[in-house]
Amino acid sequence: MVKIQDVAKDSGCSISTVSRVLNNPDLVTPDTRERVLKSIEKLGYYPNEKAKSLSSKKQNVSLGLLIPDITTFYFGELYRGISRTAKNSGIDLILRDLDDEGPLQEQILDGMVSLKKHGVSGIIISSRVMTEEYDEVLNRLRIPIVLALSEHKKLKFSSFKTDDIKASFDAISYLVSRGHKHIGMVTSSPTEDKLVGEPRYQGFKNAIDFYRLPFKAKHVAVGNNFRYEGGYSAMTQLLETRETFPFSAVFCATDEMAFGAMRSLHDHNLKVPDDVSIIGFDNLSISNMITPKLTTVSQSFEKIGVESVNHLIKILEEPKMQMETGVFYMPHQIVERESVRTI
Amino acid sequence: MVKIQDVAKDSGCSISTVSRVLNNPDLVTPDTRERVLKSIEKLGYYPNEKAKSLSSKKQNVSLGLLIPDITTFYFGELYRGISRTAKNSGIDLILRDLDDEGPLQEQILDGMVSLKKHGVSGIIISSRVMTEEYDEVLNRLRIPIVLALSEHKKLKFSSFKTDDIKASFDAISYLVSRGHKHIGMVTSSPTEDKLVGEPRYQGFKNAIDFYRLPFKAKHVAVGNNFRYEGGYSAMTQLLETRETFPFSAVFCATDEMAFGAMRSLHDHNLKVPDDVSIIGFDNLSISNMITPKLTTVSQSFEKIGVESVNHLIKILEEPKMQMETGVFYMPHQIVERESVRTI
DNA sequence: CTGAAAGCGCTTACAG
DNA sequence: CTGAAAGCGCTTACAG
């Protein structure tokens, strides 16, 4: 590693001067500046960021991002919003992902502590990671936290997400507007999963009640997870009720569940949307690449990322002023494509 | 920020001792150890990693990962392999992604320099980022580099990837084994893109020649990119040749192109695989969720990530021993599903 | 077993 | 305009 001392020696000046040509070139004679620059080039010198941020008053800000599963389909969009915004503000981003191997809880703690040790000024925590169990650690960390796609029961942290209840309600409204009266739902953990299962079921139920549509418990089919497999098995269950519940449309709690649900329909020789209409939730980029193109509720993943960072920056800028925490809903939107037909 | 000095004061001992209970607990009396630990807990002290790695002899190793586009569908798998392997070796991973906004070349340089400044001991560069233009900078960086899913013309760096030529050949062999004789290709830049376009076309052409299948230039349809749109437009072009070229199967250079190609077929009232068989390349997780499930060439993304890190670690462990650079091919595999029929 | 001191690679007042 | 010196928060021989 070539260091500032080497450059100083090579260019025949002090390290103070080398430091200046790097950080305050104006304070240095063009002549010596040239010499130093030449040495830097010649030696291939790169200032050590760690030493820099240790010694410098104006510590360069960095942000941590903690995510549960890097292979999540929408992760890229969320990340892009976060990364772009951070970059534009000259903020370093440090990513910590959780591995599905190994104990979840321990990994979350490790991740947050690691971020703290690396000196991040704030942390963005994404989705299904936040529960009250971590309150104590989070308090000890003494570091601003913002939740993306997530929520904290006691509202201790601000969060940026979609209004799942409203969005689900809107999905059903859309189906109703297309003439559907018998509407089922394919989901997972409608009562246990506070983050997605519960609110999306709630929105569905609200709409069913609001439009005075027929409802029985069995109209909501529950898979083991919010993935393809969960959607497949839930739809398969729903299909068994079809004699008494002639549904014409199904609201799926996630796009990926919708893919599984569509496959189950296909395996039962049912056509989408001719026999059964499907509406999803997420608007994954892939949802526009399948046939039929999936009609779905679009979440503003990138915007959620952008706003999370902006909010964090605001908190950092005014540390004294106790920011009001709250849930900030980012806009959602029904994207009409091909999987819902008009009756 | 509470620092070691604060803990020392609170527990009534020197900072040396505090440092010891953190790094060499055995060297400290259980009694004082307790006191220090209590203070640490009470004050919420977290050692400053930057100061630590600055002062410590045994600098903790960190690796940089440079990727062109975080939204790439297979990124998650590649990342998981890298992250998991690094984590298991106690190595820190620093991610730098490129944004499609802004000049590519500049971003690449910035990314590598930034990584260097952060003191990474090695860099993994992923896919379509490497060209000879960067040779000079890379030399100046004086840092080991490994290429994942990529290749360097002059073989200056080791790379881990799929044997695209062989894998493409195998794809065609598979089609031939299913009775197909008229086989087209949907791709992009078969001559300009050295990374994907050229080798996959080469493998296709090799197989066509090997099996003495009919070939004309127009059998290879070229889209603007390797994405859905590129696949759609290429297939649309290919369809125009159908009167004189009654192809029964098409090899798509990427799975995403295959999605586009399948859509084009659908829009022309052609069924997959009844009218036209399709084989893709990548084996994205989504390829198993669409109907028909895509038959494709599986790349070992995760393994490529794992091996890249292992190789880098080996280089770091034996810095003197000039490692032989080379291209290491990770296994590929034909995954039979539903998009190819037997004639 | 514990503490004082030097040092990691920088930045930044403070003199000159 | 430039350099010597102190300091950032740690670790680690070196004494005791």
Image (cartoon, coloured by chain):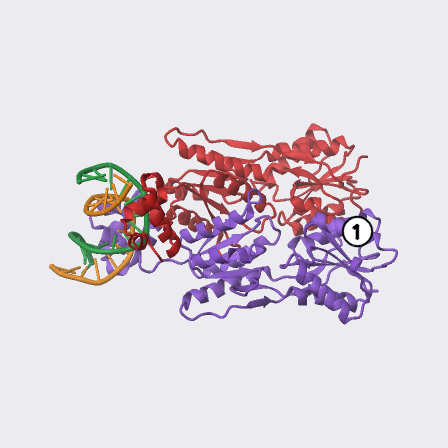
Chain colours: A red, B purple, C green, D orange
Residue closest to the eye, D15 or B208: B208
- Relative height, residue A186 to residue A38 (above, below): above
**Quadrant of residue A90 within the rendered picture:** top left
B146 lies above or below B36: below
Q: Position of residue A24 (x, y in %)?
A: 35, 40
- Looking at the image, residue B21 sits to the left or right of residue A261; the answer is left
Mark 1 — residue? B237
Regarding residue A264, the answer to whether it shows in the image is no
Q: Amino acid at mark 1?
A: Gln
The answer to which of D11 and A56 lies nearer the viewer is A56
Q: Quadrant of the C terminus of chain B?
A: bottom right
Residue B22 sits in quarter: bottom left
Q: Residue at x 54, y 68 (%)?
A: B326
Residue C8 image point, x, y percent:
29, 55
Is B125 left or right of A298, judged from the image as shown? left
Q: Quick check: B76 above or below A311?
A: below
Measuring from the top left, give residue A197's x and y in whole percent: 60, 41
How packed mark 1 is, by other alpha carbons closer than 10 Å (few <14, some 14-19, many 20 or more), is some
Q: Where is the N terminus of chain B found, in terms of image quarters?
A: top left
Q: Is residue B317 left or right of residue A230?
A: left
User: Badge 1 sits on which subunit?
Assistant: B
Q: Is residue B175 visible?
A: yes
Residue A75 in the image, given as x and y percentages of width and height: 57, 46
* Outermost front residue: A31
Q: Is residue A201 left or right of residue A153?
A: right
